[in-house]
Image: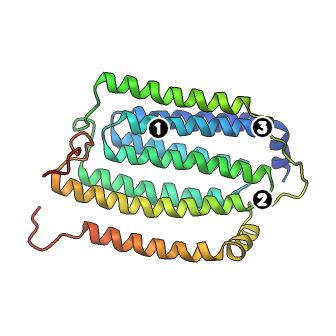
Amino acid sequence: MTLYVFLFLSFVAIFCALMTVLSKNPIHSVIYLIGCFFAIAGHYMLLNAEFLAIVHIIVYAGAIMVLFLSTLMLMNLNDETEQHKPAVAKISAVIASGLLMLVLVAVLKKADNLQVPLTQEISIGTIKVLGKVLLDEYLFPFEFSSVLFLSAMIGAVLLTKKEKGQTA
Amino acid sequence: MNLLLNIFSVVPIQYYIFISAVLFCIGVLGVLFRRNAIIIFMSVELMLNSVNLLLVAFSTYHNDASGQVFVFFVMAVAAAEVAVGLAILVTIFRNVHTVDIDELKSLKN
């Protein structure tokens, strides 16, 4: 049963990722990417990382993809305005990424079997455990990420602000 | 809990490594394949997510919460990066009226 769920989620993730890259309309790409993110969130649930699954859906599907979608609609991009690379560039892109995949898979197949320690008590994905680790061991990076967000927010506002005398 | 003990015996860690590698390569394909800068951005997000998936898989299989905390930070940085990157793209679009990377190859106006 678990294996079938895993295979289904993997199939959905890879199919949606491929359709993200290959679909002509950018809006469709965004929709497929959201599907891919939901499949990855399903993987997180399968791996007992409930907190990360919820955060993943909220942050990616809820915030980041809405940002992408609104930007695409702001620019009014659709499949008529979409430019495509020449066929030679497309074929070379497919060959290059296929070779990368070949190398990665070949190397990982040759790797030694990873020994997984089988433990009975596993509850690391819960908010209780993650919060303790986050606010105990990783307190400084956690606080520092707030500075990152502040600077990102100021940067985004400053970048999109119209300068004086600028038209259009 | 039951589900997890199940996944140790049914799904080897290698499967997660392979699906992460495939997702990463699809992201690379997207960066090389498309001309729309926003789609390239989305492909970069896809690559980040494949790495996140692998981190969560290793963290669960080795029963160490640090990996999941790291995924949390990757998500935070990705969100900040998307906000600034899309702001830059909007500014570019406002000035040149395109986000086609083949048109944006020169810094000369």
Residue ID at (8%, 71%): A165
Give the Cα separation between the discs numbered 2 and 3.
Answer: 18 Å
Q: Specify the quadrant of the image occupied by residue A167.
A: bottom left
Find disc 1 in the rendering and name its residue: B28
- Amino acid type at mark 2: Asp
User: Do the residues at discs 2 and 3 belong to one chain?
Assistant: yes
Mark toward the start of the polypeptide (1 vs 2)? 1
Residue ID at (80%, 43%): B7
Mark toward the start of the polypeptide (2 vs 3)? 3
Mark number, residue B64? 2
- Amino acid type at mark 1: Val
Residue ID at (45%, 47%): B44
Q: Is residue B24 left or right of residue A105?
A: left
Chain letter of disc 3 in the image: B
- Amino acid type at mark 3: Val
Q: Are marks 1 and 2 in contact (CB under 8 Å)?
A: no
Label 3: element kind: loop
* Residue density around tag 2, few if under 14, some if 14–19, many if 20 or more, within 10 Å: some
Label 1: element kind: helix
- Residue A110 x, y percent position in the rendering: 73, 29
Mark number, residue B11? 3
Chain letter of disc 1 in the image: B
Give the Cα separation between the discs numbered 1 and 2.
Answer: 29 Å
Q: Specify the quadrant of the image occupied by residue A151.
A: bottom left
Mark toward the start of the polypeptide (1 vs 3)? 3
Q: Is residue A161 left or right of residue A42?
A: left
- Residue A150 x, y percent position in the rendering: 43, 75
